[in-house]
């Protein structure tokens, strides 16, 4: 099965081509403000480098959030358009799941954190077993950093952070003799290749059902709501 996967949930945008569980190509650009312009060229490069035609693609996948509201919409809309055109199914992958999936750590908890602005983060807490099976221990959350750190202090295990807000969280680390928190820099940003690999193990769906996953309203939506009150 050939999967085309994209991610635009953070400041980096990427596209990858997965063929029978192997990464054939992947391209990334780090420029949050240009996702609408950069994503399709990344897709074209990924398809070209893999030596296939778009009509060969069996499945399309994208991160669906949480993350940048505009970025998530761009990724979801792009995948839906391509899937509609080729009459193929889609899969949506949660951005936090994607980040946690890339961390190979069995002794510690995994906590992906994405900057939600105003000293808040999108986050969840996970663990992996020795078979690399990922288990989410909390809800998906959009909470103040201080609240997350209080939550993590309640766990006995050490914690590995990943995601673009890890530095913000480490600055809140309580003073202690033995370090409880670390960083997995290898999974600093979501990767389209990971999205594609995860999609192979998820239920396929109709493009019409693929929707962004938001943990809170965008600023524009909040402003509109306040005007209607």
Image: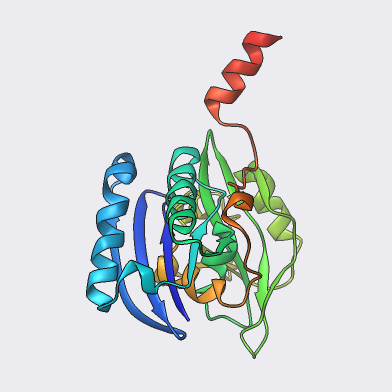
Q: Is residue 128 left or right of residue 139?
A: left
Tell me which residue sits at (31%, 61%) in the image.
43
Which residue is the extreme one toward the bottom? 131
Q: Which residue is more in the foreground, 196 or 88? A: 88
Quadrant location of the C terminus in the rendered image? top right
- Where residue 5 appears, as percent x and y from the top left, is 43, 65
Tell me which residue sits at (61%, 55%) in the image.
174
- Where residue 132 appears, as percent x and y from the top left, is 61, 85
- Where residue 67 appears, as percent x and y from the top left, is 51, 47
Tell me which residue sits at (56%, 68%) in the image.
100
Question: What colour scheme governs how the chains and residues are painted in the rendered image of this protein?
Answer: rainbow
- Where residue 223 appears, as percent x and y from the top left, is 58, 17
Q: Quadrant of residue 36?
A: top left
Tell me which residue sits at (64%, 51%) in the image.
209
Using the rendered image of the protein, determine whether residue 206 is visible from the camera's viewpoint.
yes
Count of picture labels = 0
Q: Quadrant of residue 105?
A: bottom right
Q: Is residue 91 left or right of residue 1?
A: right
Using the rendered image of the protein, determine whether residue 189 is visible from the camera's viewpoint.
no
Q: Which residue is more in the foreground, 186 or 30? A: 30
Vertically, is 76 above or below 24? above
């Amino acid at each position: 099965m050939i999967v085309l996967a994209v991610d635009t949930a953070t400041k980096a945008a990427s596209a990858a081509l997965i063929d029978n569980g192997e990464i054939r190509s992947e391209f990334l650009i780090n420029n949050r403000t240009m996702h609408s312009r950069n994503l399709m060229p990344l897709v074209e490069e990924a398809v070209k480098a893999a030596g296939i035609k778009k009509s060969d693609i069996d499945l399309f996948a994208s991160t669906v959030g949480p993350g940048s509201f505009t970025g998530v919409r761009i990724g979801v809309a792009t995948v839906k358009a391509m899937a509609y055109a080729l009459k193929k199914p889609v899969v949506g992958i949660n951005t936090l799941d994607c980040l946690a999936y890339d961390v190979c750590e069995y002794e510690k908890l995994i906590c992906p954190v994405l900057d939600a602005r105003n000293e808040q983060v999108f986050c969840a807490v996970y663990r992996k077993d020795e078979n690399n099976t990922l288990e989410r221990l909390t809800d998906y959350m959009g909470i103040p950093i201080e609240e997350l750190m209080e939550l993590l202090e309640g766990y006995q295990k050490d914690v590995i952070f990943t995601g673009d807000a890890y530095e913000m969280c480490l600055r809140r680390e309580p003073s202690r003799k033995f370090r409880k928190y670390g960083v997995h820099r290898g999974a600093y940003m979501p990767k389209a290749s990971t999205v594609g690999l995860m999609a192979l193990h998820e239920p396929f769906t109709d493009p019409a059902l693929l929707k962004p996953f938001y943990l809170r309203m965008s600023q524009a939506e909040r402003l509109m709501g306040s005007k209607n009150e």
